[in-house]
Image (tube, grey):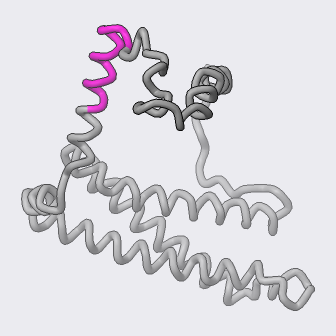
Amino acid sequence: AQFLAEDVRANTDSLLKSSTTGKSKGFCNAPTLKQALPEEKIGRGLLEALTKKMAADSQTDADVQQLVDSLAEDFRNNLATFFRRSTELLRHFFTLRSVFSDDSDGNGGFGRSESQKAKLSNIVQEMEKEYGKMSELSKTLEEEESKMFKPIMNQLDWAFKLHREDDSKTRGGFVAVSGFVPVET
């Protein structure tokens, strides 16, 4: 790119400096491009990709509304309920988590009282229940509908990961594992 820019600059500097001469102001001597377009095979691929991208980007609110209207009423209600419930649980989770990590007093934060630990534990348990319900429901749905739960489940996954990391710090680096994991030999 730098070589191309230097080449263009070298070929046009003299033309621009003599822009006051003649009717065409010096651009009649401008170089012409010998290969202005890519090879046919590459050009066709680029145009097809660009066309697909433009078509995907041109979806309107009407397209979205049409998709929503095609979903079953029960599914829409479940999705909205899971979204609201998960959002509220995540809000409480991150609020309580921020209280634990607040270090405004210079003593490493407020610490975790037993009631705060219990409250956070209850929130995480409720998030796990919601996650489990969504997971079970998404197994019974068509692929397109089950994908709609993915963003909510990803947010819950992130919160679980943060909780495990925080929990391992307070327990000396160990993470609780429930049950045994079978090992294949």
Front-most of residues 77 and 66: 66
Q: Is residue 78 above or below residue 122?
A: above
18 sits left or right of 107 in the view = left
**Any magenta on residue 61?**
no
Q: x and y percent of residue 14 in the render? A: 62, 26
**Residue pictured at 84% horizontal, 88% vertical:** 104
Q: Is residue 184 visible?
A: no
Q: Is residue 183 visible?
A: yes
- For the stretch drawn in magenta, the main secondary structure is helix
129 sits left or right of 117 in the view = left
**Residue pictured at 67% horizontal, 61% vertical:** 164
Image quarter where the N terminus lies is: top right
For this orientation, the residue located farthest to the front is 22
Q: x and y percent of residue 74 in the render? A: 13, 67
Front-most of residues 156 and 112: 156
Q: Is residue 128 above or below residue 105?
A: above
Front-most of residues 185 and 82: 82
Image quarter where the C terminus lies is: top right
For this orientation, the residue located farthest to the right is 106
Q: x and y percent of residue 115 in the render? A: 67, 89
User: Where does the magenta region start and end?
Assistant: 38-50
**Residue pictured at 68% horizontal, 86% vertical:** 116
Q: Is residue 97 above or below residue 132?
A: below
Q: Is residue 36 above or below residue 133?
A: above
**Any magenta on residue 48?**
yes
Q: Quadrant of residue 119?
A: bottom right
